Amino acid sequence: MSTLEFKRSEPFTLGVELELQIVNRRDFDLSGSAPDLLRLLEKQAHGGEIKPEITRSMLEISTGVHATHGTLIVELRGLRDTVVRQADRLNLGIAGGGAHPFQHWSDRRIYDTPRFRHLSELYGYLAKQFTVFGQHIHVGCESGDKAVALVHAMARYMPHFIVLSAASPFLQGVDTGFDSARLNSVNAFPLSGCMPPVRSWAEFDTYFDDMRALKVVESMKDFYWDIRPKPEFGTIEIRVCDTPLSVERAAALAAFAQALATALVENGPPPLDPDQYRVYGYNRFLACRFGIDAEFIDVKLREKTSLREDLLRTLDLALRYASDLSGADAMRMLQQDVEALRNGSLWLREEYKRTNSLGDVVRAQSEVWSGRREA
């Protein structure tokens, strides 16, 4: 009898989670004000969900289920506006981006919940270092078997999502040379990486039972994979993205995920190729390090190619499967940015070059997130 029940959902429906930075307006360092902000937000009517994350300098917003980009972006803007209004009352800023440019992990405080206390006791200082900020994208699947197949098919494209969302070039006050330094923090956890090469939901269920029997995991939440099934939601969940600088970018990434998943399923997901996972970690590293300029090892061609060119071809394919006109327009915006070699990390570096102040960079990030300025 199956231990993990996969809850069927409508294929290709969408949901988004975004982890956000809470900053003070004095020097724009992180602020441990999540408890105060959440108390205000509890009194406000809003869609979706707003909840704490592992440290008190973080906040997570999550949407409901959507069939199209058009309705998703409306809810995201509403959630953003609700959070920003209440943050303004506390003289706080809210920012996107995958990592705060100059905060020190040792200054962080764990948010007081049983799960976060457990993670802090288990992972030690890594729990505070996990004050990084990501976007998670959920895509609906009608069965566990189809979710497993789609996870394997989408794994090839995780570098594409990394470079499109990259917005964490700075850490601890220095330019890391990476477009997405955030994922280096995720890599420190023992259950990061990718799903094992199981071929069905029954195989996955057996794997999960074995891992739980060995006391490695207690639930699916303990797997920090880049992309994973989410059986209680009936989705696959893409987890490699930095939180973008704006909700518009976040919604565009979700539209891309939806359209690409639709294309892969309707064209028949390719059979599991073990070679894909032999190059997976290296392709992921190249995307984090070099962004749109990265090389990409194409397993099918068995050669290195340009990630930018592969991404443009993939966006061309996805555009044919957009769920609505606004989703297609959002993907065209991504396409234009790839053609121009633009992403969030480039914008942050240019802002630092202009101001020579990381505090001013975070100020600008908070203005972009609030919708008061364009990136």
Image: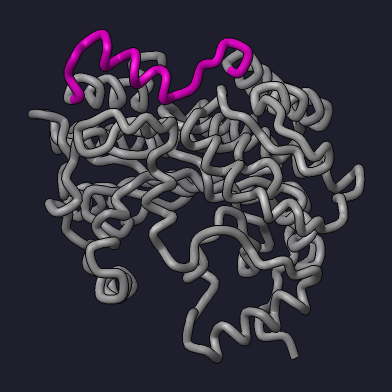
Is 249 left, or right, of 159 in this rendering? left
344 left or right of 314?
A: left
Judging depth in this view, the residue of 82 and 206 nearest the camera is 206
Whole-percent x, y for residue 323 in the image: 76, 33
Q: Is residue 209 visible?
A: yes
User: Is 351 contained in the magenta span?
Assistant: yes
Q: Which residues are magenta?
A: 338-358
Residue 206: horizontal and vertical position, in percent? Answer: 70, 83
Main secondary structure of the magenta stretch: helix
Q: Quadrant of residue 167?
A: top left
Instruction: Look at 22% across and 23% down and name the residue there.
Output: 363
Name the residue furthest left. Answer: 26
Identify the colour scheme used: one colour
Q: Residue furthest right?
A: 267
Q: Quadrant of the C terminus?
A: top left
Residue 78 visible in the picture: no
